Image (cartoon, helix red, strand yellow):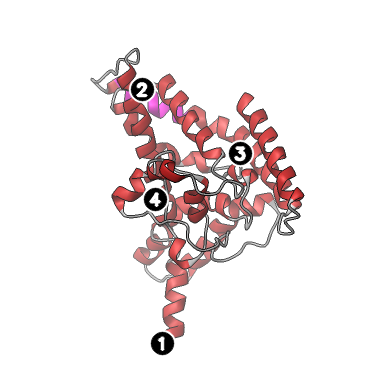
């Protein structure tokens, strides 16, 4: 609750500076929409968190490993373990249509400000827990995971802004507004890059890192052009089901669900070239 109040204050301050600079591209309706979507996602997310906790606690109960959370190094390990899990959750959320259908909510705005940070899927809790249960098998207690994961998400709030430019040496290790602006870009060279949560080292290690060089164009490949919060949270599923109808084989339908969300776009591009 405290974090939400701080987020609201920081967003208000950022909005003041944006408007003071007379940025015509600032969309007030989109900003209020983000706040509404974010508020509802917190409420619904609390419901899904109950089931997430059951899965985590079950894994904790059967693992023979127990991390000593009174030791500083255990917290350091948890920090990196949680961030590593976030990297792969985030990456798969871009590379598999099933997971993208949740995550697209966050990317569907053509704006980039602190309000976008809270624009999160109402139903993402259905599947994202899969990536974090392995942390329980490493012996980290649920309460410690909840705290660390919360810190990870709080860190990611401030990187959703255009008001902070490059940050020198800090960018070599950590995710920054510059790195994350790239992630939200639909410029060809920026697509599916910079998945980091806190540490940018994962992107550099796994070949998904690129620096911000040209001005970023925000949004998704197929613009949504809607302020309807329910449609924003569900449109990708309808598009997926429509695509499945065009597939004649069971394997083809499965590919619609789990293959790249850009599969239809790529196939249409090939047909045009032919």
Image location of residue 24, percent across then percent down: 74, 59
Instruction: State which tag comes first along the sequence, 1 or 3.
Output: 3
Image location of residue 148, percent across then percent down: 44, 27
> According to the image, label 1 marks what residue?
274
Which one is in front in this view, the residue at disc 3 or the one at disc 2? 2
Q: Secondary structure at mark 4?
A: helix
Image location of residue 90, percent across then percent down: 43, 47
In the picture, measured across the screen, residue 46 lies left or right of residue 71, that is right
Distance from the alpha carbon under mark 1 to that under mark 3:
43 Å
Instruction: State which tag comes first along the sequence, 3 or 2.
Output: 3
Image location of residue 218, percent across then percent down: 58, 59
Which one is in front in this view, the residue at disc 1 or the one at disc 2? 2
In magenta stretch: residue 57: yes
Disc number for residue 92? 4
Instruction: State which tag comes first along the sequence, 2 or 4.
Output: 2
Distance from the alpha carbon under mark 1 to that under mark 2:
55 Å
Q: Residues within 10 Å of mark 2 (few under 14, many from 20)?
A: some
Q: Residue at x 47, y 57 (%)?
A: 212
């Amino acid at each position: 609750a405290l974090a939400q109040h701080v987020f609201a204050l920081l967003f208000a301050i950022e909005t003041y500076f944006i408007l003071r600079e007379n940025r015509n591209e600032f969309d007030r309706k989109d900003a209020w929409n983000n706040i509404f979507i974010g508020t509802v996602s917190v409420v619904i997310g609390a419901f899904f968190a109950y089931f997430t906790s059951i899965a985590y606690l079950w894994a904790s109960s059967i693992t023979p490993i127990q991390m000593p959370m009174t030791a500083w190094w255990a917290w350091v390990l948890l920090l990196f373990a949680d961030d590593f899990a976030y990297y792969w959750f985030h990456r798969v959320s871009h590379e598999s249509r099933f997971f993208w259908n949740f995550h697209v909510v966050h990317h569907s705005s053509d704006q980039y400000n602190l309000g976008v940070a809270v624009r999160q899927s109402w139903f993402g809790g259905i599947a994202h827990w899969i990536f974090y249960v392995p942390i329980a098998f490493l012996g980290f207690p649920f309460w410690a995971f909840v705290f660390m994961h919360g810190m990870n998400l709080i860190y990611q709030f401030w990187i959703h802004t255009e008001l902070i430019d490059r940050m020198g040496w800090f960018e070599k290790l950590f995710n920054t507004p510059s790195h994350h602006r790239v992630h939200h870009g639909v410029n060809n060279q920026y697509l599916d890059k910079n998945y980091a949560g806190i540490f940018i080292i994962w992107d550099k290690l796994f070949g998904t890192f690129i620096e911000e060089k040209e001005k970023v164009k925000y949004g998704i490949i197929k613009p949504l052009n809607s302020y309807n919060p329910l449609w924003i949270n569900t449109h990708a599923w309808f598009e997926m089901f429509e695509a499945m109808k065009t597939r004649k084989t069971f394997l083809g339908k499965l590919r619609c669900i789990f293959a790249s969300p850009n599969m239809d776009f790529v196939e249409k591009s090939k047909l045009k070239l032919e």
